[in-house]
Image (cartoon, rainbow, N blue to C red):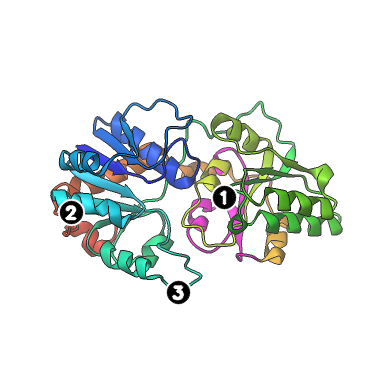
Amino acid sequence: MRIVVCSPAFHPMIGGLEEVARLCCLEFHRAGHQVTVITDTALGGAAELPFPVVRRPTFLKILHLVAGCDVFLEFNMSLKGLVFPLLCGKPAVVSHQSWFSDIRQPATKRARLKHWTSRRVINIACSQAVKDYLSAEAAVIPNAYDDHTFRLIPEMERGRDLLFVGRLVSDKGASLLVEAVGRLALDGIDATLTITGSGPEEEPLRQQVRQLGLEARTSFTGPLRGEALAREMNRHRILVVPSLWAEPFGIVALEGIACGCWVIGSEQGGLKDAIGPCGATFPNGSVEGLCGALKEAHTGPNPIMASFHLKTHTSRIVAAAYLKVLEKAKFCSLICPPKGVRKSGHLP
């Protein structure tokens, strides 16, 4: 197939959307399909990829690319992006990696329009929670992780306790984790904490660490990715994903499990699907719930359970599921989802 992939954010940016789009495109290419990526992300420090990535293209360039494809795949719905397959009469598949607006607030007009539009395209949802959120049927295909990079590294000493990985913004809940570590210290539990990432909340987090007297046990590494992140995960016993909002999925949980971490995450949204039997959840925003989960945490996931859980999240398996949907979509119009997906909402 000739597949045009539209991903507003893409490599070398760091994030779940960027990673799942990159992994799927690599597997599509390896399977012999012709892949072209359209993105708004500038080149930056991007490594070379084996397929063309057209960055910040003009309207006419996008129109030309979409006119020559068999199927259009969009990661996260962009109403502007869907104009192109509509103009060219090409089938459109949307991989929903997030909510249309903050689900803690009433739906915006744009969100309501996206709900309406989702009934007129072919949908893939990254978790059951995202599927339940949509106003349309969708195939639930969980996200993949980089199973070549994230793995057990036996020679690494697992000498630290808690690890946070993510953007340092309020919704990711790093401050909640720092507060929980402070409370554990008052109970006589001295846990080490590593915070990996960057963002506007970094200085407030450092101030919070100082105020709670946790400087000696807390490290800030800055953002890490790839092999460096895998090695950092292998140094820790527990990965904590304390998001205040409902995560649509949570690839970082898969990465942590693959590196031998027990994962503790907030329970709303799709994060619980990513964690599976390899960790525990607590109510979003509850420092008491997080403290309880930390006190009861295992030293690591059961290797057999972890292997079984991760098997369905390899990039090869996930991309193969995507390709089944794309193959069916190829024979449909933009406004006619394939029969199997429309009726059942599951993989054909």
Q: Position of residue 188 (x, y in %)?
A: 86, 55
Where disc 2 sits, the SS reads helix
Q: Say few, some or many: other residues with alpha carbon within 10 Å of mark 3 (under 14 / 14 to 19 / 20 or more).
A: few
Q: Which amino acid type is shown beneath numbered disc 1? A: Cys
Horizontal side of 90 relative to 261 (left or right) equals left
Name the residue located 23 percent from the left edge and 46 percent from the top edge.
72
The residue type indicated by label 3 comes to: Pro
In magenta, the rendered stretch is 257-285
Q: Which mark is residue 278?
A: 1
- Residue 118 % position (x, y): 28, 62
Labels 1 and 2 touching (C-beta < 8 A): no
Q: Is residue 192 above or below residue 154?
A: below
What residue is disc 2 on? 86
The x, y position of residue 115, in whole percent, is 32, 66
Judge from the rendering whether residue 195 lies leftward or rightward of residue 76; answer left or right. right
Relative to 196, say whether 295 is above or below. Answer: below
- Nearer to us in this view, 169 or 23: 169
Residue at 20 percent across and 37 percent down: it is: 2
Spatial CA span between label 1 and label 2: 43 Å
How far is mark 1 from mark 3, CA to CA?
34 Å
Q: CA distance from mark 3 to mark 2?
A: 29 Å
Place residue 242 in its image quadrant. Answer: bottom right
Amino acid of disc 2: Leu
SS for tag 3?
loop
Q: Which residue is mark 3?
A: 106
